[in-house]
Image: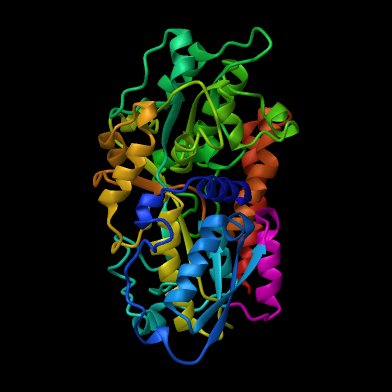
Protein backbone atom coordinates (compact mmCIF):
# COMPACT_ATOMS: atom_id res chain seq x y z
CA UNK A 1 0.00 0.00 0.00
CA UNK A 2 1.65 3.37 -0.88
CA UNK A 3 1.83 5.67 2.15
CA UNK A 4 -1.72 6.86 1.79
CA UNK A 5 -3.04 3.42 0.98
CA UNK A 6 -1.66 2.11 4.26
CA UNK A 7 -3.10 5.05 6.15
CA UNK A 8 -6.45 4.24 4.66
CA UNK A 9 -6.31 0.65 5.77
CA UNK A 10 -5.16 1.23 9.27
CA UNK A 11 -7.29 4.27 10.00
CA UNK A 12 -10.41 2.47 8.92
CA UNK A 13 -9.61 -0.71 10.79
CA UNK A 14 -8.92 1.35 13.87
CA UNK A 15 -12.43 2.74 13.59
CA UNK A 16 -14.15 -0.63 13.72
CA UNK A 17 -14.20 -3.03 16.65
CA UNK A 18 -16.06 -6.30 16.51
CA UNK A 19 -15.87 -7.15 20.19
CA UNK A 20 -17.57 -10.48 19.62
CA UNK A 21 -14.53 -11.60 17.62
CA UNK A 22 -12.55 -11.54 20.84
CA UNK A 23 -15.17 -13.21 23.02
CA UNK A 24 -16.28 -11.17 26.00
CA UNK A 25 -15.11 -7.61 26.23
CA UNK A 26 -11.51 -7.44 27.41
CA UNK A 27 -10.75 -11.10 26.66
CA UNK A 28 -8.16 -12.12 24.06
CA UNK A 29 -9.42 -13.42 20.75
CA UNK A 30 -6.89 -16.24 20.59
CA UNK A 31 -6.29 -19.02 23.06
CA UNK A 32 -2.69 -19.84 22.18
CA UNK A 33 -0.69 -21.12 25.10
CA UNK A 34 1.73 -18.83 26.86
CA UNK A 35 4.13 -21.72 27.42
CA UNK A 36 7.53 -21.17 28.98
CA UNK A 37 7.66 -17.63 27.62
CA UNK A 38 5.15 -16.61 30.29
CA UNK A 39 7.94 -17.08 32.88
CA UNK A 40 11.63 -16.35 33.18
CA UNK A 41 13.81 -13.33 32.55
CA UNK A 42 12.00 -10.14 31.60
CA UNK A 43 12.74 -8.70 28.16
CA UNK A 44 11.56 -5.47 26.56
CA UNK A 45 10.63 -5.35 22.87
CA UNK A 46 10.82 -2.15 20.86
CA UNK A 47 7.85 -2.32 18.46
CA UNK A 48 7.88 0.18 15.58
CA UNK A 49 4.47 0.76 14.02
CA UNK A 50 2.28 3.55 12.71
CA UNK A 51 0.41 5.71 15.18
CA UNK A 52 -2.95 4.90 13.60
CA UNK A 53 -2.49 1.44 15.13
CA UNK A 54 -0.44 1.98 18.26
CA UNK A 55 -2.41 4.95 19.54
CA UNK A 56 -5.75 3.17 19.19
CA UNK A 57 -7.84 1.97 22.13
CA UNK A 58 -7.86 -1.51 20.57
CA UNK A 59 -4.07 -1.75 20.66
CA UNK A 60 -3.82 -0.47 24.21
CA UNK A 61 -6.36 -3.07 25.33
CA UNK A 62 -4.45 -5.75 23.42
CA UNK A 63 -1.19 -4.73 25.07
CA UNK A 64 -2.71 -5.16 28.52
CA UNK A 65 -3.90 -8.65 27.58
CA UNK A 66 -0.55 -9.57 26.06
CA UNK A 67 1.57 -8.46 29.00
CA UNK A 68 -0.78 -10.24 31.40
CA UNK A 69 -0.41 -13.43 29.37
CA UNK A 70 3.38 -13.03 28.98
CA UNK A 71 4.52 -11.19 32.13
CA UNK A 72 8.19 -11.55 31.19
CA UNK A 73 7.69 -9.74 27.84
CA UNK A 74 7.26 -5.99 28.00
CA UNK A 75 6.51 -3.92 24.91
CA UNK A 76 7.88 -0.46 24.18
CA UNK A 77 5.68 0.88 21.34
CA UNK A 78 7.35 3.38 19.01
CA UNK A 79 4.46 5.26 17.41
CA UNK A 80 5.08 7.16 14.16
CA UNK A 81 2.50 8.92 11.93
CA UNK A 82 2.24 6.98 8.71
CA UNK A 83 3.32 9.83 6.45
CA UNK A 84 6.63 9.89 8.38
CA UNK A 85 6.91 6.15 8.92
CA UNK A 86 9.13 5.01 6.04
CA UNK A 87 11.72 7.74 6.56
CA UNK A 88 11.79 7.14 10.31
CA UNK A 89 12.05 3.37 9.85
CA UNK A 90 14.86 3.63 7.30
CA UNK A 91 16.86 6.02 9.47
CA UNK A 92 16.48 3.83 12.56
CA UNK A 93 17.40 0.60 10.79
CA UNK A 94 20.21 2.03 8.66
CA UNK A 95 21.82 3.58 11.74
CA UNK A 96 21.78 0.26 13.57
CA UNK A 97 19.34 1.43 16.22
CA UNK A 98 17.91 -1.57 18.03
CA UNK A 99 14.35 -2.43 17.00
CA UNK A 100 12.66 -5.78 17.63
CA UNK A 101 9.53 -5.74 15.46
CA UNK A 102 8.28 -3.56 12.61
CA UNK A 103 5.01 -3.25 10.71
CA UNK A 104 4.67 -2.65 6.96
CA UNK A 105 2.55 -3.16 3.88
CA UNK A 106 3.80 -5.13 0.88
CA UNK A 107 5.74 -2.27 -0.68
CA UNK A 108 7.30 -1.20 2.61
CA UNK A 109 8.38 -4.66 3.74
CA UNK A 110 9.91 -5.61 0.39
CA UNK A 111 11.73 -2.30 0.48
CA UNK A 112 13.17 -3.37 3.85
CA UNK A 113 14.05 -6.82 2.49
CA UNK A 114 15.84 -5.27 -0.49
CA UNK A 115 17.75 -2.93 1.83
CA UNK A 116 18.90 -5.97 3.84
CA UNK A 117 17.27 -4.67 7.02
CA UNK A 118 15.41 -7.86 8.00
CA UNK A 119 16.31 -11.30 9.30
CA UNK A 120 14.84 -14.52 7.86
CA UNK A 121 12.14 -15.97 10.11
CA UNK A 122 12.53 -19.65 9.25
CA UNK A 123 14.69 -20.69 12.21
CA UNK A 124 13.18 -18.44 14.87
CA UNK A 125 9.68 -19.50 13.78
CA UNK A 126 10.50 -23.09 14.72
CA UNK A 127 11.56 -21.90 18.19
CA UNK A 128 8.20 -20.12 18.55
CA UNK A 129 6.25 -23.18 17.33
CA UNK A 130 5.15 -21.51 14.09
CA UNK A 131 5.13 -23.26 10.72
CA UNK A 132 5.63 -20.52 8.14
CA UNK A 133 4.80 -22.88 5.26
CA UNK A 134 1.52 -24.16 6.75
CA UNK A 135 0.06 -21.64 9.20
CA UNK A 136 -0.78 -18.91 6.66
CA UNK A 137 -2.49 -20.71 3.81
CA UNK A 138 -0.89 -20.21 0.41
CA UNK A 139 1.81 -17.83 1.65
CA UNK A 140 5.08 -18.25 -0.24
CA UNK A 141 8.67 -17.48 0.78
CA UNK A 142 9.73 -13.90 0.14
CA UNK A 143 13.26 -14.16 -1.19
CA UNK A 144 15.76 -16.93 -1.88
CA UNK A 145 13.38 -19.51 -0.44
CA UNK A 146 13.19 -17.76 2.94
CA UNK A 147 10.40 -16.03 4.85
CA UNK A 148 11.01 -12.49 6.02
CA UNK A 149 7.41 -11.39 6.66
CA UNK A 150 4.94 -12.58 9.30
CA UNK A 151 1.59 -12.05 7.51
CA UNK A 152 -1.16 -10.08 9.22
CA UNK A 153 -3.92 -10.08 6.63
CA UNK A 154 -4.58 -10.25 2.92
CA UNK A 155 -6.80 -7.46 1.73
CA UNK A 156 -10.08 -8.31 0.03
CA UNK A 157 -11.19 -5.78 -2.59
CA UNK A 158 -14.75 -5.33 -3.81
CA UNK A 159 -17.21 -2.77 -5.14
CA UNK A 160 -19.05 -0.62 -2.58
CA UNK A 161 -22.04 1.40 -3.68
CA UNK A 162 -24.50 3.95 -2.36
CA UNK A 163 -28.01 2.56 -2.79
CA UNK A 164 -29.60 6.01 -2.53
CA UNK A 165 -27.55 7.35 -5.45
CA UNK A 166 -28.60 4.33 -7.51
CA UNK A 167 -32.25 4.80 -6.51
CA UNK A 168 -32.21 8.52 -7.31
CA UNK A 169 -30.79 7.80 -10.76
CA UNK A 170 -33.16 4.89 -11.40
CA UNK A 171 -30.23 2.51 -11.96
CA UNK A 172 -30.43 -1.15 -10.83
CA UNK A 173 -28.02 -2.27 -8.11
CA UNK A 174 -24.93 -4.27 -9.14
CA UNK A 175 -25.29 -8.05 -9.12
CA UNK A 176 -24.16 -9.49 -5.74
CA UNK A 177 -22.21 -12.36 -7.34
CA UNK A 178 -21.49 -11.47 -10.98
CA UNK A 179 -18.96 -8.63 -11.37
CA UNK A 180 -19.43 -5.76 -13.77
CA UNK A 181 -16.76 -5.27 -16.39
CA UNK A 182 -14.79 -2.04 -16.11
CA UNK A 183 -16.52 -0.76 -19.23
CA UNK A 184 -19.91 -1.47 -17.66
CA UNK A 185 -18.80 0.33 -14.51
CA UNK A 186 -17.86 3.39 -16.58
CA UNK A 187 -21.32 3.43 -18.16
CA UNK A 188 -23.06 3.06 -14.80
CA UNK A 189 -20.87 5.77 -13.25
CA UNK A 190 -21.91 8.15 -16.02
CA UNK A 191 -25.60 7.42 -15.41
CA UNK A 192 -25.19 8.08 -11.69
CA UNK A 193 -23.36 11.38 -12.12
CA UNK A 194 -25.26 14.61 -11.50
CA UNK A 195 -23.12 17.75 -11.49
CA UNK A 196 -25.96 20.27 -11.33
CA UNK A 197 -26.90 22.01 -8.12
CA UNK A 198 -24.89 22.78 -5.00
CA UNK A 199 -23.89 19.20 -4.15
CA UNK A 200 -22.28 17.41 -7.07
CA UNK A 201 -22.77 13.66 -7.30
CA UNK A 202 -20.03 11.70 -9.02
CA UNK A 203 -20.78 8.18 -10.15
CA UNK A 204 -17.37 6.90 -9.11
CA UNK A 205 -15.02 7.73 -6.25
CA UNK A 206 -11.30 6.94 -6.33
CA UNK A 207 -8.26 7.53 -4.18
CA UNK A 208 -4.94 8.91 -5.37
CA UNK A 209 -3.24 5.53 -5.02
CA UNK A 210 -1.61 3.52 -7.73
CA UNK A 211 -4.06 0.64 -7.98
CA UNK A 212 -6.90 2.97 -8.93
CA UNK A 213 -4.99 3.82 -12.09
CA UNK A 214 -3.12 0.64 -13.01
CA UNK A 215 -5.17 -2.02 -11.18
CA UNK A 216 -7.34 -2.86 -14.21
CA UNK A 217 -4.10 -3.61 -16.06
CA UNK A 218 -2.87 -5.82 -13.24
CA UNK A 219 -5.95 -7.98 -13.73
CA UNK A 220 -5.17 -8.23 -17.45
CA UNK A 221 -1.54 -9.34 -17.12
CA UNK A 222 -1.64 -11.11 -13.74
CA UNK A 223 0.23 -8.38 -11.90
CA UNK A 224 3.25 -8.33 -14.19
CA UNK A 225 4.78 -5.08 -12.95
CA UNK A 226 8.28 -6.24 -13.92
CA UNK A 227 9.73 -7.75 -17.07
CA UNK A 228 11.37 -11.16 -16.96
CA UNK A 229 14.76 -9.50 -16.53
CA UNK A 230 13.56 -7.43 -13.56
CA UNK A 231 12.97 -4.11 -15.28
CA UNK A 232 9.87 -1.90 -15.07
CA UNK A 233 6.88 -3.11 -17.09
CA UNK A 234 4.52 -0.18 -16.45
CA UNK A 235 4.59 0.72 -20.16
CA UNK A 236 2.98 -2.63 -21.06
CA UNK A 237 -0.20 -2.27 -23.16
CA UNK A 238 -2.36 -3.65 -20.34
CA UNK A 239 -1.34 -0.86 -17.98
CA UNK A 240 -1.74 1.77 -20.68
CA UNK A 241 -5.27 0.50 -21.32
CA UNK A 242 -5.99 0.78 -17.60
CA UNK A 243 -4.79 4.38 -17.41
CA UNK A 244 -6.79 5.32 -20.49
CA UNK A 245 -9.91 3.79 -18.93
CA UNK A 246 -9.55 6.09 -15.94
CA UNK A 247 -9.02 9.06 -18.24
CA UNK A 248 -12.27 8.20 -20.01
CA UNK A 249 -14.20 8.07 -16.73
CA UNK A 250 -12.61 11.20 -15.30
CA UNK A 251 -12.16 13.53 -18.27
CA UNK A 252 -14.51 12.29 -20.99
CA UNK A 253 -17.54 11.00 -19.11
CA UNK A 254 -16.94 13.46 -16.22
CA UNK A 255 -18.07 10.68 -13.87
CA UNK A 256 -15.20 11.05 -11.38
CA UNK A 257 -13.67 14.12 -9.74
CA UNK A 258 -10.82 15.68 -11.78
CA UNK A 259 -7.48 14.71 -10.30
CA UNK A 260 -6.32 18.31 -9.83
CA UNK A 261 -9.41 19.02 -7.73
CA UNK A 262 -8.98 15.78 -5.77
CA UNK A 263 -5.37 16.65 -4.90
CA UNK A 264 -6.03 20.33 -4.22
CA UNK A 265 -8.87 19.51 -1.82
CA UNK A 266 -6.85 16.81 -0.05
CA UNK A 267 -9.76 14.49 -0.74
CA UNK A 268 -9.24 11.29 1.25
CA UNK A 269 -11.05 7.97 1.44
CA UNK A 270 -13.39 9.20 4.16
CA UNK A 271 -14.96 11.59 1.66
CA UNK A 272 -16.82 8.68 0.10
CA UNK A 273 -19.08 8.59 3.15
CA UNK A 274 -20.48 12.08 2.60
CA UNK A 275 -23.02 10.46 0.27
CA UNK A 276 -22.05 12.27 -2.93
CA UNK A 277 -20.53 9.29 -4.74
CA UNK A 278 -22.19 6.29 -6.34
CA UNK A 279 -19.46 3.64 -6.26
CA UNK A 280 -15.94 2.98 -5.07
CA UNK A 281 -13.63 -0.01 -5.34
CA UNK A 282 -12.22 -0.61 -1.88
CA UNK A 283 -10.92 -3.25 0.48
CA UNK A 284 -12.47 -4.60 3.66
CA UNK A 285 -11.99 -1.41 5.65
CA UNK A 286 -14.86 0.22 3.77
CA UNK A 287 -17.20 -2.39 5.20
CA UNK A 288 -15.74 -1.76 8.63
CA UNK A 289 -16.56 1.92 8.19
CA UNK A 290 -20.06 1.05 7.01
CA UNK A 291 -20.55 -1.00 10.15
CA UNK A 292 -19.58 1.92 12.38
CA UNK A 293 -21.80 4.51 10.68
CA UNK A 294 -23.83 5.29 13.80
CA UNK A 295 -20.82 6.14 15.94
CA UNK A 296 -18.31 7.54 13.46
CA UNK A 297 -19.83 8.08 10.04
CA UNK A 298 -23.55 8.86 10.33
CA UNK A 299 -25.45 8.60 7.04
CA UNK A 300 -29.02 8.37 5.80
CA UNK A 301 -28.32 5.89 3.00
CA UNK A 302 -27.59 2.19 2.76
CA UNK A 303 -24.38 0.71 1.43
CA UNK A 304 -24.15 -2.30 -0.85
CA UNK A 305 -21.31 -4.63 -1.80
CA UNK A 306 -20.55 -6.59 -4.97
CA UNK A 307 -17.49 -8.20 -6.59
CA UNK A 308 -14.90 -5.79 -7.90
CA UNK A 309 -15.07 -5.03 -11.65
CA UNK A 310 -13.04 -7.12 -14.08
CA UNK A 311 -11.82 -6.75 -17.67
CA UNK A 312 -14.18 -8.03 -20.36
CA UNK A 313 -11.73 -10.88 -20.98
CA UNK A 314 -12.29 -12.08 -17.38
CA UNK A 315 -16.09 -11.60 -17.36
CA UNK A 316 -17.76 -13.62 -14.62
CA UNK A 317 -14.58 -14.26 -12.62
CA UNK A 318 -14.25 -13.18 -9.00
CA UNK A 319 -10.96 -11.27 -8.83
CA UNK A 320 -9.03 -9.54 -6.07
CA UNK A 321 -6.03 -7.25 -5.82
CA UNK A 322 -3.80 -9.13 -3.42
CA UNK A 323 -1.70 -7.26 -0.90
CA UNK A 324 -0.42 -8.46 2.46
CA UNK A 325 0.32 -6.35 5.52
CA UNK A 326 2.91 -7.98 7.74
CA UNK A 327 5.27 -7.78 10.68
CA UNK A 328 9.01 -8.37 10.41
CA UNK A 329 12.05 -8.67 12.65
CA UNK A 330 15.06 -6.41 11.93
CA UNK A 331 18.50 -8.02 11.76
CA UNK A 332 19.64 -6.23 14.92
CA UNK A 333 16.69 -7.37 17.07
CA UNK A 334 17.77 -8.46 20.55
CA UNK A 335 14.91 -10.87 21.19
CA UNK A 336 13.73 -12.48 17.94
CA UNK A 337 11.85 -15.38 19.55
CA UNK A 338 9.88 -13.09 21.85
CA UNK A 339 9.32 -10.73 18.91
CA UNK A 340 7.68 -13.52 16.95
CA UNK A 341 5.52 -14.42 19.95
CA UNK A 342 4.34 -10.80 19.99
CA UNK A 343 3.73 -10.99 16.24
CA UNK A 344 1.63 -14.14 16.61
CA UNK A 345 -0.52 -12.63 19.36
CA UNK A 346 -0.83 -9.32 17.49
CA UNK A 347 -2.21 -11.14 14.46
CA UNK A 348 -4.52 -13.58 16.23
CA UNK A 349 -5.80 -11.18 18.90
CA UNK A 350 -5.37 -7.50 18.00
CA UNK A 351 -6.13 -7.89 14.28
CA UNK A 352 -9.42 -9.64 15.00
CA UNK A 353 -10.32 -6.98 17.56
CA UNK A 354 -10.16 -4.37 14.79
CA UNK A 355 -12.61 -6.28 12.60
CA UNK A 356 -10.06 -7.65 10.13
CA UNK A 357 -9.57 -11.32 9.22
CA UNK A 358 -6.00 -12.52 9.88
CA UNK A 359 -4.22 -14.86 7.48
CA UNK A 360 -3.22 -17.00 10.47
CA UNK A 361 -5.09 -20.24 9.81
CA UNK A 362 -5.47 -21.08 13.50
CA UNK A 363 -8.05 -18.29 13.72
CA UNK A 364 -11.59 -19.44 12.91
CA UNK A 365 -13.15 -17.60 9.96
CA UNK A 366 -16.80 -18.50 10.51
CA UNK A 367 -17.27 -16.36 13.61
CA UNK A 368 -15.61 -13.43 11.86
CA UNK A 369 -18.02 -13.67 8.92
CA UNK A 370 -21.03 -13.93 11.25
CA UNK A 371 -20.01 -10.90 13.30
CA UNK A 372 -19.32 -8.74 10.27
CA UNK A 373 -22.61 -9.72 8.62
CA UNK A 374 -24.47 -8.90 11.82
CA UNK A 375 -22.78 -5.48 11.96
CA UNK A 376 -23.87 -4.80 8.36
CA UNK A 377 -27.44 -6.08 8.64
CA UNK A 378 -28.90 -2.55 8.62
CA UNK A 379 -27.54 -2.25 5.07
CA UNK A 380 -29.28 -5.50 4.10
CA UNK A 381 -25.90 -7.13 3.52
CA UNK A 382 -26.13 -10.88 4.07
CA UNK A 383 -23.84 -13.50 5.59
CA UNK A 384 -23.60 -15.13 2.16
CA UNK A 385 -22.33 -11.88 0.62
CA UNK A 386 -19.84 -11.30 3.43
CA UNK A 387 -18.49 -14.84 3.25
CA UNK A 388 -18.10 -14.69 -0.53
CA UNK A 389 -16.38 -11.30 -0.69
CA UNK A 390 -14.33 -11.21 2.52
CA UNK A 391 -12.12 -14.23 2.04
CA UNK A 392 -14.49 -17.19 1.91
CA UNK A 393 -14.44 -17.86 -1.85
CA UNK A 394 -11.83 -20.54 -2.61
CA UNK A 395 -12.02 -19.76 -6.34
CA UNK A 396 -11.17 -16.07 -6.16
CA UNK A 397 -8.40 -15.06 -8.59
CA UNK A 398 -5.76 -13.01 -6.77
CA UNK A 399 -3.41 -10.72 -8.70
CA UNK A 400 -0.72 -8.37 -7.42
CA UNK A 401 -2.15 -5.11 -6.17
CA UNK A 402 1.05 -3.16 -6.74
CA UNK A 403 4.77 -3.61 -7.50
CA UNK A 404 6.67 -5.08 -4.56
CA UNK A 405 9.94 -6.44 -5.93
CA UNK A 406 12.59 -4.16 -7.47
CA UNK A 407 12.67 -0.68 -5.85
CA UNK A 408 8.98 -0.87 -4.86
CA UNK A 409 8.90 2.36 -2.87
CA UNK A 410 10.51 4.30 -5.72
CA UNK A 411 8.23 2.60 -8.26
CA UNK A 412 5.03 3.62 -6.51
CA UNK A 413 6.07 7.14 -5.53
CA UNK A 414 7.47 7.96 -8.98
CA UNK A 415 4.32 6.71 -10.66
CA UNK A 416 2.09 8.84 -8.45
CA UNK A 417 4.32 11.89 -8.82
CA UNK A 418 4.02 11.77 -12.62
CA UNK A 419 0.62 10.29 -13.44
CA UNK A 420 -1.32 13.48 -12.70
CA UNK A 421 0.44 15.11 -15.66
CA UNK A 422 -1.47 12.75 -17.95
CA UNK A 423 -4.84 13.33 -16.32
CA UNK A 424 -4.44 17.11 -16.40
CA UNK A 425 -3.47 17.02 -20.08
CA UNK A 426 0.09 18.23 -19.54
CA UNK A 427 1.63 15.01 -20.93
CA UNK A 428 0.55 12.06 -23.05
CA UNK A 429 0.13 8.69 -21.42
CA UNK A 430 3.09 7.32 -23.38
CA UNK A 431 5.35 10.15 -22.26
CA UNK A 432 4.42 9.69 -18.61
CA UNK A 433 4.93 5.92 -18.69
CA UNK A 434 8.31 6.33 -20.37
CA UNK A 435 9.43 8.77 -17.66
CA UNK A 436 8.31 6.38 -14.92
CA UNK A 437 10.13 3.50 -16.59
CA UNK A 438 13.42 5.39 -16.97
CA UNK A 439 13.45 6.70 -13.40
CA UNK A 440 12.49 3.43 -11.73
CA UNK A 441 14.79 1.32 -13.91
CA UNK A 442 17.62 3.55 -12.70
CA UNK A 443 16.50 3.01 -9.09
CA UNK A 444 16.44 -0.76 -9.64
CA UNK A 445 19.93 -0.60 -11.12
CA UNK A 446 21.22 1.35 -8.12
CA UNK A 447 19.53 -1.09 -5.77
CA UNK A 448 21.29 -4.02 -7.43
CA UNK A 449 24.66 -2.47 -6.60
CA UNK A 450 23.98 -2.37 -2.87
Q: Residue at image x 49%, y 75%?
A: 67
- The answer to whether residue 331 is seen in the rendering is yes
Q: Nearer the viewer, residue 187 or 422?
A: 187
Q: Which x, y percent locates residue 135?
A: 30, 67
Frontmost residue, 141 versus 324: 324
Q: Is residue 375 magenta?
A: no
Query: Vertical placement of 96 versus 375: above or below?
Result: below
Q: Is residue 286 above or below residue 54?
A: above
Instruction: Provide residue 309's location: percent of width, then percent of height.
Output: 40, 30
Residue 40 percent coordinates (x, y):
45, 92
Q: Is residue 371 left or right of residue 218?
A: left
Q: What residue appears at the point 45 percent right and 60 percent down from the top-left corner?
A: 350
Name the quarter where the C terminus is drawn: bottom right
Query: Can residue 305 be seen in this snapshot?
Result: no
* 426 or 129: nearer the viewer: 129
Q: Given the current orientation, which residue lies at the most extreme front position?
A: 25
Q: Which residues are magenta?
A: 80-99
The residue shown at (29%, 43%) is: 370
Main secondary structure type of the part rendered in magenta: helix
Residue 173 falls in which quadrant of the image? top left
Amino acid sequence: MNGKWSLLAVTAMMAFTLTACGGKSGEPASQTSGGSEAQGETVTLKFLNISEYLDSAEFKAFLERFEAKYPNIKVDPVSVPHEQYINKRNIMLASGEQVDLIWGNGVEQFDAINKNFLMPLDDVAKEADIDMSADFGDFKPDKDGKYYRFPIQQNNWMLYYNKKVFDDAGVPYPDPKVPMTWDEMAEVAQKLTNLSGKDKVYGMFYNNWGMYFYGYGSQLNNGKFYTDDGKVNIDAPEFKRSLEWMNDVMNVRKAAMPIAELIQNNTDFLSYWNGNYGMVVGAQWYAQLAATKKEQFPRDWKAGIAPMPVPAEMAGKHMNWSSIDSLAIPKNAKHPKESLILAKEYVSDYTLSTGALPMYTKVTKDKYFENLADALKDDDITLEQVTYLFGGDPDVVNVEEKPVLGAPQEYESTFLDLISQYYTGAETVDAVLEQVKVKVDNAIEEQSKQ
